[in-house]
Image (cartoon, rainbow, N blue to C red):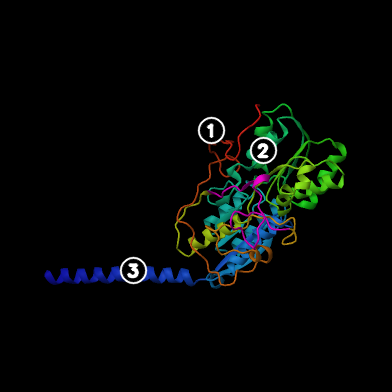
Amino acid sequence: MRNWKRLGRATMLCTTAAVALAGLVGSAHAEDKKFKIYLSLSYSGNAWQSEAANIVKALAATPPYDKQVELIEVISGTDPQAQISAYESMIEAGADGIVTFPISSTALNRVIKRGCEQGVKFFTYDATVTEPCAYNVSYITSGFGENSAQALVNELGGKGKIFLSRGVPGNSVDKRHTDGAMHIFKQYPGIEIAAEYYSYWDDRTTQQETAKALAAHPDVDGIWAQAGEYGAIQALQDAGSKLVPITGENSNGLRLALANPDMQAKGLKGVSAGSPPAQSGYAFKLLMEILTGKRTLEPTNIEYPLPWVPAASVQVCAGDTFENGCNVFPEGKVPSSFVTEVFNPELLPELSLTSALDGKPTPGATIQPLPADVVKAPNEPGINCQNCEPPADLYKLTKIQPTVTP
């Protein structure tokens, strides 16, 4: 009997050792395997999309990801059906993960669910989907629309004609921004929306559409703009119009203009906030940590912080990165359309200006681990969840407070 017990213990020890060894081998295999990752863009052609894609490309070429990742970029355009077809092809090709800017928050759900069922991990960045199996990494729940709208209302004293320069029709980012902004504007009867147009987050298109609006409403008092906002400033200058308060996103051109005393004297005021291209890199690193067994994370909505730079806080950088409080590059360093928010020392210390401009890895950099915790985003029906309840303070102001009574 005693011998049987000894044999049992020996067998158990061997089994335990084998399981442990298998775990180590499995972990090593996850480390060594080359994962097939797709970078799926829908809308492209503007500076923001190029930078977001370049960031992922630069990270994928940074050790050790350069030995672990086969990265394939696919651009499908603004038609949801085209992106659905692209996803289907990626799934059939054996994708391990898809890092994507989705064109619609709902139209892609069915194909995303099918991909999840086949083991594909979907990580969206900036724009979101409502399919529960996807990971959404986005700043859009952090309040750009409502905070920037309140900033414009404050500058205008609660009354005046304004333009709304929007993004891409049907996209979750544009919807959330505009919903938040309208929540504020509707509180002020003195605010008149004289023109509303889609500018596709592009400087040139914004300039063209703003010029059309100025032809009909030359007496505009302010402009609430999403990305492409520097085009609105150019349209005002081309028309010989007075400059007016503008709230926009993070272009280098806008930030330099806000800090320019000559433009201030002509009436330009405002704030730079909005979407950081760095979200794509954060989504990609989270995906890779899951695939390589370094992180366990169920599908969830993750919030990226909202940049907020009022005119008085603009500070020109001396070098190639954001240091000592600087937040814009000198004229000639980058194009005016360059979206400044590409750095995050905590989440993406591997990135450099070259990463965002050319998609090249930073010399000598290696991938650094992400912080253990992620910031969960609130549920927002139609934006990042289905059949869910929004928080009671959905449009709570977090960056600015009213200086005008509604």
Question: Please, what is the dominant secondary structure of the magenta stretch?
Answer: loop
Q: Position of residue 42 (x, y in %)?
A: 69, 55
- Determine which of the numbered discs, if any, sits on residue 151 in the image: 2
Binning the other alpha carbons within 10 Å of mark 2 as few (below 14), some (14 to 19) or many (20 upward) gives many
Q: Is residue 304 magenta?
A: yes
Q: Amino acid at mark 3?
A: Ala
Q: Is residue 344 magenta?
A: no
Mark 1–mark 2 distance (CA, rounded to whole Å): 22 Å
- Name the element at disc 2: helix
Q: Is residue 279 left or right of residue 231?
A: left
- Name the element at disc 3: helix
Q: Give the magenta-colored segment's residue range.
A: 302-330
N-terminal-most mark, 1 or 2: 2
Q: Is residue 110 above or below residue 38?
A: above
Q: Which residue is mark 3?
A: 20
Instruction: Find out whether the residues at labels 1 and 2 contact each other: C-beta distance under 8 Å.
Output: no
Mark 1–mark 3 distance (CA, rounded to whole Å): 48 Å
Is 237 or 317 nearer to us in this picture?
317
N-terminal-most mark, 2 or 3: 3
Q: Amino acid at mark 2?
A: Ala
Is 29 or 375 nearer to us in this picture?
375
Q: Which residue is mark 1?
A: 392
N-terminal-most mark, 1 or 3: 3
- The residue drawn where x is 65% and y is 33% is 183
